[in-house]
Image (tube, rainbow, N blue to C red):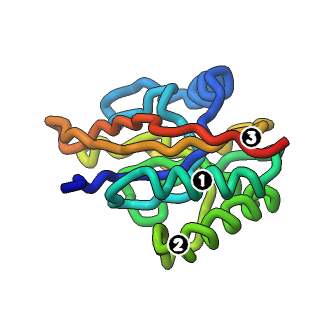
Amino acid sequence: MVTAQRLFIAIPLLPDLAQQLCQMLPQYGDDRFGSWQAERNLHLTLLFLGEQGEAEPVIELMEQSAAACHHLDFTADSLALLPAQNAARQLWAFQPQPNSVLMQLQTQLAERFTAAGLYASSRAYLPHITLLRGNAACPLPLPLEPVDGFALSVNRMVLYRSSAEALPDGGEWRHYEPLHTTYLSV
C-alpha cells in the first residue's frame, strides 16, 4: 500500500539569492517571532499538489511539462512582506504585481496537472516565498517595509516532499526533501 505524501513543485532559490533575501530582513533569525525558513528551504511555489500517492506520475508529467516550457528570466521589482492569505501565522514575501512570464509558466503547469487529475485548487495563484511560520504568542510587527526586488533565472523545477514537526511553542518546523529535478528546455 502506498503512503500518501505532501508534494509540491517549486523553483528553488539559488543559495546567494536566498542569503541576500534573508539578510534584507532585520528580524531574520529572531526565533521569538517563530520558525524562520532555513535558507536552503526557500523556494517559489508553483503548484501545491497536496496529498499524493506515488511520485512517479507527477515526475512523468513534470518532464512533459518542462519540455514545453522555456528557460525564463524575470525580475521581482519589489517584495511585500505580509501575512499569508489564509494563515496569519506565516510571513510571505511576494511581488505585488506578479510577473507575466512566471504566471504563464504556473498556468501551463496547473492546466496540465488538473487535466491529469493531480491538481485541484480553487485559490488564485499568488507567487510567494514563505519566510516564517509564526509564533502566536509573539507576532511579528507588521507591516514590514517592502524590500528591494531581485532577478531570478529559472532553468529548473523541483518536486519536493513536505513533512512537518510540531514545536513546543505551537509553531511547526518544515522539512522539504527534493525528490526530482526537471530542467526546462533552453
Query: In the rendered view, does 175 fall on the left or right side of 107?
Result: left
CA separation in Å, label 2 and label 1: 11 Å
Quarter placement of the C terminus: top right
- Which mark identifies residue 62? 1
Q: Using the image, determine if residue 174 lies above or below residue 66.
A: above
Q: Are marks 2 and 1 in contact (CB under 8 Å)?
A: no
* In this view, the mark in front (2 or 3): 2
Determine the residue positioned at 57% across, 27% down: 22
Q: What residue lies at 81% left-to-right and 61% top-to-bottom? A: 100
Q: Point out residue 159 in the picture as x, y percentages from the top left corner.
A: 50, 45
The residue carrying mark 2 is 116
At x 32%, y 58%, the residue is 53
Element carrying mark 3: strand
User: Would residue 68 be found to the left or right of residue 175 on screen?
Assistant: right
Does 4 appear above or below 34?
A: below
Percent x, y for residue 122?
49, 78
Label 2: state its secondary structure: loop
Residues at marks 1 and 3, CA–CA distance in whole angstroms: 15 Å
Tell me the CA gap for discs 2 and 3: 24 Å
The image position of residue 52, as x and y in percent, is 35, 59
* Res. 34 in view: no
The answer, for residue 154, to whether it is visible in the render is yes
| Mark number, residue 80 | none
Disc 1, SS:
helix
Image coordinates of residue 62 in percent, x first then y, are 60, 53
Quadrant in the rendering for residue 132: top left
According to the image, label 3 marks what residue? 154
Q: Nearer the viewer, residue 142 or 117?
A: 117
